[in-house]
Image: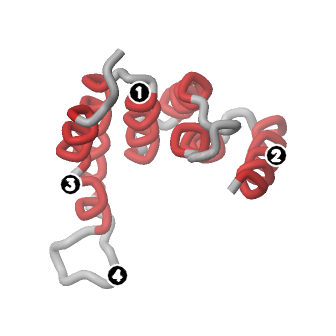
């Protein structure tokens, strides 16, 4: 994983050097920092900074809200994480992006985001104390 993370980080940083307002690159790099299992790359503070920049550019993108939720969570800010997860769900549901392998009426977005607040609460109960 470390090699893949290093390659992705290099590519995304190069892209952002040329296009600093590319919100998808900001979000992807933030997501990597927020979710990597490699301690060398896991960086909640940096994830938050990048995701906040992306959110200023594209405030209606549910992916960014989801990244913010994860960044808050790994920093131990569980209530904020849940609020951002709920907003991600609200935005994703509003978009109702169809999932090609599901029956009509179901969406990929709803399926992927519906359990987020519940998952956050479960993770908060199991989180180590301060």
The residue carrying mark 3 is 114
Residue 93 disc label: none
SS of the residue under disc 1: helix
Contact between marks 2 and 1 (CB within 8 A): the answer is: no
Disc 3 versus disc 4: distance between alpha carbons?
Answer: 18 Å
Disc 2 versus disc 1: distance between alpha carbons?
Answer: 24 Å
Left-right relation of 15 to 104: right
Left-right relation of 85 to 29: left
Is 57 located above or below residue 116 in the figure? above
Q: Where is residue 111 in the image (x, y as percent from the top left)?
A: 25, 64
Name the residue rendered at 20%, 54% in the picture: 114
Disc 3 residue crowd, few under 14, some 14–19, many 20+, Cα 10 Å: some
N-terminal label among 1 and 3: 1
N-terminal label among 4 and 1: 1
Disc 1 residue crowd, few under 14, some 14–19, many 20+, Cα 10 Å: many
N-terminal label among 3 and 4: 4
Disc 2 versus disc 4: distance between alpha carbons?
Answer: 33 Å
Disc 2 residue crowd, few under 14, some 14–19, many 20+, Cα 10 Å: few
The residue carrying mark 1 is 72
The C terminus sits in image quarter: top left
Q: Position of residue 25 (x, y in %)?
A: 65, 45
Disc 4 residue crowd, few under 14, some 14–19, many 20+, Cα 10 Å: few
The residue carrying mark 2 is 10
């Amino acid at each position: 994983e470390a090699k893949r993370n290093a390659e992705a980080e290099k590519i995304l940083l190069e892209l952002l050097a040329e296009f600093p307002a590319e919100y998808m690159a900001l979000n992807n790099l933030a997501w990597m920092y927020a979710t990597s299992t490699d301690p060398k790359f896991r960086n909640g503070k940096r994830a938050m900074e990048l995701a906040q920049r992306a959110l200023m550019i594209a405030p209606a993108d549910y992916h960014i809200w989801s990244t913010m939720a994860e960044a808050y969570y790994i920093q131990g800010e569980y209530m904020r994480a849940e609020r951002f997860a709920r907003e991600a769900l609200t935005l994703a549901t509003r978009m109702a992006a169809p999932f090609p392998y599901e029956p009509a009426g179901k969406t990929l977005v709803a399926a992927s985001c519906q359990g987020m607040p519940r998952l956050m609460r479960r993770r908060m109960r199991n989180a180590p104390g301060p």
